[in-house]
Each structure stands twice: as C-alpha cells, then as structure tokens.
Amino acid sequence: MTEPIRLLHFSDVHIGMENYGRTDPSTGISSRVMDFLRSLNTIIEFAEQNEADLAIFSGDAFKSSSPNPTYQREFARRIKRLAKVCPVVLLVGNHDIPAMAQKASSIEIFHTLAVDNVIVGRADEIHRIETRRGPAQVATVPYPVRQRLLSSISTAGMSLGHVDALLSEQVDELIRNLANRVDDTIPAVLAAHLTVQGARLGSERGIMLGRDVSVLLSTLADPIWDYVALGHIHYHQDMNFGQYPPVVYSGSIERVDFGEEGDAKGFVWAELARGKTTFQFIELEARPFITIRVDVRKHRDPTKAVLKEIAKHDVTGAVVRVIITTTPENDPHIRQKDIEAALGNAGFVAAIQRDIDYPVRARLGVERPEELSPLELLDLYLVKKGTASDRIELLKEYAERIMEEETSPGC
C-alpha cells in the first residue's frame, strides 16, 4: 500500500508587520518581524524533522507587495531551505499583488529565476508534482483579481453588490473547471487564497486591500479534492466541519494585532491520500497579546485598582494594552509612571488607554463608539438624525464606494 504523502500547509506570513515592535540591534530588523521569521523557522524545522513530502504556502508572503530587500532576502533564505526538504508551492495572495497589473508580484522572482523545487501559483492551473512518496496534483487559485476576472464583462452602472456576485460566479466557475481536469487516480489538492462564505474572520478584514470576494463552500467541498489548502483568513478553521474533503484555513503564523489576541497560531500537517486525507493543526508559540481592562469609576485610588488588575496577568514578553474606564473626576488621579513600571516585563506596551466616561456616550446609546467601524458610525449618526431607512442604505452604499476607491490597489 502506498504511504500517505506528508503535506505541510501554512499561510499568511506577512513579513514586514512591524506593529508593536522595536528595532533589534543585533539584526537591524524590527523585533516583530523577527517574531514572524522565528515562527517560519519553526515550521521549516518541523518539515525537516518529519520529512515533509510537499509544502504549500497559501499566500501573503509580505505585508505589502513592495517589501524591502532585507525582508525579501530573509523570506527567500527560508524558502530555499524548505525547498531542500520537498517541493514547495507558493501561492500569490492579495498582499503579494502590486497596485499596477503590469508589475510583478512580490514572489514572482522565484518563478523568474526558476528556483529549484519551487512552484509559484501565479495562475489558475493544475501542477503535477512528484514527491518521495508518489505523485500529487496541486491546483492553484491565486487571489481573485476583479480586473482580470471581469475584463470581458461590462460592469458600468452595476451596484457594488451585483459586481461582487458576478465576481463570485466567475471564481466558482474557474474552480469547477479545475475540478473537471483533475486526474482522479492520484491525490489532489486545491490551494486557494480567498474568502469562503461563512468563514470566521480575523484581523485580515482590517488589512484587506480593497473589496473582497467570497466563494461558496459547496464550490470547494468537491470530493474530487483530497485537501483544500486555504489562505487569506487568519483564523485556523476547517470550513467543512470534519466532512470530506477537509477545507482548511491554516491561519496566520503570528498575531497581527489585538483582534487576534485569543487565536491560536500555527500550521497544518496532513497525510494526503486519495479519498482518506487526515490532518492536524500544529500550534506555534506566537507572541502573546494581552488586553487588561479595568473599571476605576468607583475607586477612590484608581491607580491601586489598575495595579491590582495588572498583577493578575503574566505580561512577560507580551504585547500589552491597558484600557482604563474612568471618569473626568478620577482621571487626574491615575499615576501613569506607576502603571508603566508595573508593565516593565512586557515585550511591548501598545497603549495605556484612558476611556473616560463622558455623558455623551449615554446620548449615543453605545458603550464604546471608538470601536465602531466608519460605516457603523455613519449608520448610528443617520439614525440619530432621523434619516429614513432607505436613505440610510443609499448613503451607506455611496460611502462604501468612496472608501473602496480610497483603499483599492487598482488591481
């Protein structure tokens, strides 16, 4: 009997995320970037120790499509090392795509130089790959670029919702076309960088470039595939809930911000076999993010209350923020230096935020208006102004269109 193919699946490396970091004097690189590189090192060491047969990276190598040369070098070093273990498929994600369609993606260089044992998934196609435990086929679906997918379709006058639905249909069709070309005698993997409808979203929503497109689970959960290796969403999850085939987001390898504070980070190790693939999530020791919330509105000594709450948490090496709910009267009595001293063992203090409870909050009818999105704030404002519901929806659609134009990479 043929042994299962040992498949390593990881995604969303985002090298270049420097939030909550300081320059490491020994390397000249941000300490947060070093966190991501260390996690990537751990993944590669796992592949070496467990004799991986095939590695699939499901997109988003860097924070942006124009990474600095140092980050390119560090990523390339690690991919070259991984490629000595097994064939590596690098999928193009949305952060790898340049603003101008004529420019190369941030990982195009691997294809241009024909780096040995590295395949760049830059188009919708099927790659037959020979591994030490037999052949496999990997269908690659890079991040759906609307200009390319809708190039032959006029969208003039269409609503944003109509355009999104049309784009989803195009992606569904191309994935089904790939499924029709699969050789059903050897293990088949679909690698895609996109959003599946119903996925639990992480902070990727906050760092997406332009509008996103979502794909139906039924399109991906075709039993012709033995494993679906997804990237783009930072939260690890099996979208098919234990049914066959596994439709898996490996998740990102490090926390990007506090939106991912409670999320486990890691990669997937699968045993790929025709009709009977199994997988497990391998958790990485990502840097912890800790939010400490304390309400001192009724405390005579607000600083003492804050220090008592900090003492309940192990902040050693963590990225920490402290959110203090206070009153205008209590705020002057909060001693900032004492709080900073109590956080001396933290890896990075992101914020010591004073959330002052002004009467205006009661009038707005929300506890934390600063945590609402721009569209949510607009909706709240219009409701308070007594604007008709149909008018609100129209204004929100125009506002969303303006925000899209401001943030879209033009691809």
Image (spheres, rainbow, N blue to C red):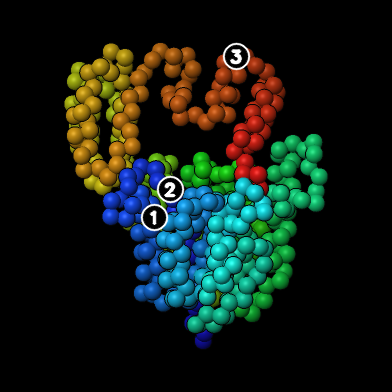
Local secondary structure at mark 2: loop
For the residue pair 136 and 411, the one nearer the viewer reads as 411
Per the model, the C-alpha gap separating discs 1 and 3 is 46 Å
What's the residue type where badge 3 is placed? Lys
Position above or below: 187 against 67 = below
Disc 2: which residue:
17
- Residue 343 is labelled as none
Per the model, the C-alpha gap separating discs 2 and 1 is 8 Å
Disc 3: which residue:
385
Q: Position of residue 52 (x, y in %)?
A: 44, 74
Of callouts 1 and 3, the N-terminal one:
1
Q: Which residue is rendered at x = 29% and y = 29% of the image?
A: 294
Of callouts 2 and 1, the N-terminal one:
2
What's the residue type where badge 2 is placed? Met
Name the front one of labels 2 and 3. Answer: 2
Q: Position of residue 196 (x, y in %)?
A: 60, 52
Disc 1: which residue:
36
Per the model, the C-alpha gap separating discs 2 and 3 is 40 Å
Q: Which residue is rendered at x = 63% and y = 54% of the image?
A: 103
